[in-house]
Image: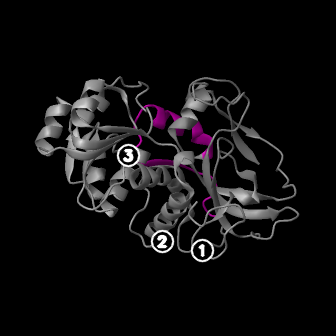
Amino acid sequence: MRAVVCPEYGPPEVVRIEERPSPLPGPGQVRVRVRAASVNFPDVLLTAGSYQISVPPPFVPGSEYAGVVEAVGDGVDALAVGDLVTSTGLIGAFAEEVVADAAKLTPVPAGVDPRVAAAFGVAHRTAFHTLRSVARIGAGDDLIVLGAGGGVGLAAVQLGVALGASVTAVASSADKLDVAASYGATHLVNHRDGDLRDALRRALPDGAHAVIDPVGGDLAEPALRTLRRGGRFVTVGYASGVIPKIPLNLVLVKGIHILGFQFQDIPADEYLRNERELTELLVAGRVTPHIGASFPLDKAADALRHVADGRAVGKVLLDIAPGAGGTSSSLRTNPGTSPGFP
């Protein structure tokens, strides 16, 4: 089977295609024929050796995929050959075949396309848990989403609208804002067109209830200044590469809450509730990932470069085995996984 390999740390162009033996599943494991894998910004950072967790090369990058079970190891009862499944992890997804612990795989709900499944997990789960349990967005809230053209940002736009918020999308181009508008954003702000603080004040003269920030850098402070008293500012990541410095007097004067998001901080009961609600939104067709670009496996370097240069709108996919068949199921749930998706 073919796999994308990062032989040494470097820019996206360092990765190459290698032929490797087809892996065999051990006890409690299955082998998955990958249909599609999502290309995320952390994949770029891992390849460059600049992620918060380092993986020594050589390694196969890729953290998110969907595919078809094609071999089952001893002791696996919850999955069968032919099942469509999805999973997330740190590395390993950019390959034609992946071996994974069965307990870490989730069946793709009935009616959900494998490409959608591959693009859905990381961004939409991050956005929904952030909105639901950290920002605590409710109907009628005014929500600002920074980086609204990216994977997490565009997911936050969709899900904020689904939760009843009025969303102000902030992005770096008219094309990205057009996509955000198509998913329900009420106000559109191109931060490259001028003073972001003034633009946000014009859009939201009474201020915002919450800000979701996966970007950091120079966008954070103007957005924070737009919050009304008691507003919530949630930092999700730093796609700009710059960790912002916030004047704490703003927090004091406005009683603002600055919050961070990590999955492990969500209480167990809320986590299960969020996963269930998110799955229901997906299956009902109320939210879906926007796949802005796709590449074949042998163009993985181009896909990583596309993400690294900030050109991605929504999600970027590697189409690895688009015609590999498989059966989706919303009935089985693996031991050790939540009933949500993925």
Chain part drawn in magenta: 297-323
State the residue at coordinates (57%, 37%): 43
Q: Amino acid at mark 3?
A: Gly
Distance from Cα at disc 1 to Cα at disc 2 = 9 Å
Does residue 42 appear in this view? Answer: yes
**Label 3 or label 1, whichever comes before in sequence order:** 3
63 lies left or right of 193: right
Q: Position of residue 311 (x, y in %)?
A: 40, 37
Q: Position of residue 139 (x, y in %)?
A: 27, 62
Q: Position of residue 41 (x, y in %)?
A: 50, 37
Whether residue 195 is situated above or below residue 82 in the rendered picture = above
Residue 330 marker: 1
- Badge 3: how crowded within 10 Å, few (<14), some, or many (20+)? many
State the residue at coordinates (70%, 51%): 96
Q: Quadrant of the C terminus?
A: bottom right
135 lies left or right of 254: right
**Label 2 or label 3, whichever comes before in sequence order:** 3
Q: Position of residue 47 (x, y in %)?
A: 61, 30
* Residue wearing tag 3: 153
- Badge 1: how crowded within 10 Å, few (<14), some, or many (20+)? some
- Asked if the residues shown at circle 3 and circle 1 are in contact, with their CB atoms under 8 angstroms apart, the answer is no
* Residue wearing tag 2: 283
- Asked if the residues shown at circle 1 and circle 2 are in contact, with their CB atoms under 8 angstroms apart, the answer is yes
Relative depth, front residue between 294 and 177: 177
Q: Is residue 299 magenta?
A: yes
